[in-house]
Amino acid sequence: MKNIIKITSGVIILLGLLTISLNSCDKSEKINENNTEINNSDLKSGTNSASVNVECSGSCEDEDSGCGAYWNIPEGRIECTCSNGCAMVITMDNESGRSTVPRSDMSALAEHFLDYIDRIHGTENYIITNFKHTFYDLAEFIEVKYTLNGNTSEIYSIVYLVEFPSTDPDASPSGSVSVDCHGSCDTATEKCVEVYDTSTGEVYCKCESDNCKMTIEEL
């Protein structure tokens, strides 16, 4: 059984070199006296990172199938929902020229994502609207935005953090979590979504509201 940890006001969890903090989604919360933040410029600096952004845009001939993407579990691949009229658009930001070959177990993450959709939303009918994979020396950060049951007006999101003990391409992950911010914000202009601050290494919910909660699940 997976260990689900709900973060509430005043609680801080350190995951190796990644600091995840929340105080009713308040990103200003400091590390408490019992924990020490470990700084690592290679992990937290955006200058040494590379990102791959994947979207499927257009329309499908089958009206019952919207153009988007889904996660192929066995291969851990992102694929468009249809072939005619729906095209994959890949945008890469890689000034550092680093490798963008995932070290994460993409099949395992895909399996968790589908299980999560079923557990949390009670459906298997989803479409991924955006998939962004960011690579750091000692971690990979994966953002997934999706819609449910053909309702394109509401977009949900979940992120995955996978940490590695070294830059060895064959090194196994030393820690993996999913992070889900869900609920509502006090103002209509804000969304209760996950944010990763590359300058501090913190993950937090975007708005500061008691209705916006973060759930961390160890994988």
Image: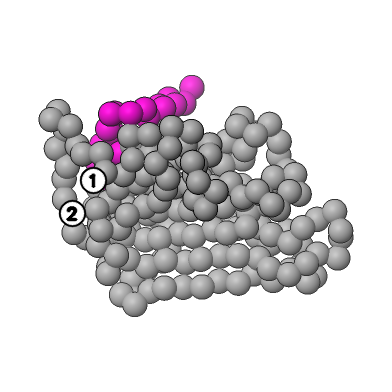
- Is residue 11 shown to the viewer in this render? yes
Residue positioned 78% across, 71% down in the render: 85
Residue 137: % across, % down: 27, 59
**Quick check: is 15 in the magenta stretch?**
yes
Residue 30: % across, % down: 21, 39
Instruction: Reply above or below: 126 against 35.
Output: below
- Is residue 168 shown to the viewer in this render? no
Q: Nearer the viewer, residue 35 or 42?
A: 35
Q: Tell me which numbered mark, 1 or 2, is placed earlier along the sequence.
A: 1
Q: Amino acid at mark 2?
A: Asn
Q: Nearer the viewer, residue 187 or 163?
A: 187
* Mark drawn on residue 40: 2
* Mark drawn on residue 17: 1
Residue positioned 49% across, 42% down in the render: 185
Q: Amino acid at mark 1?
A: Leu
**Left or right relative to 82: residue 130:** left
**Left or right relative to 93: residue 49:** left
Residue positioned 73% across, 48% down in the render: 151
Q: Nearer the viewer, residue 184 or 118?
A: 184
Highlighted range, magenta:
1-21
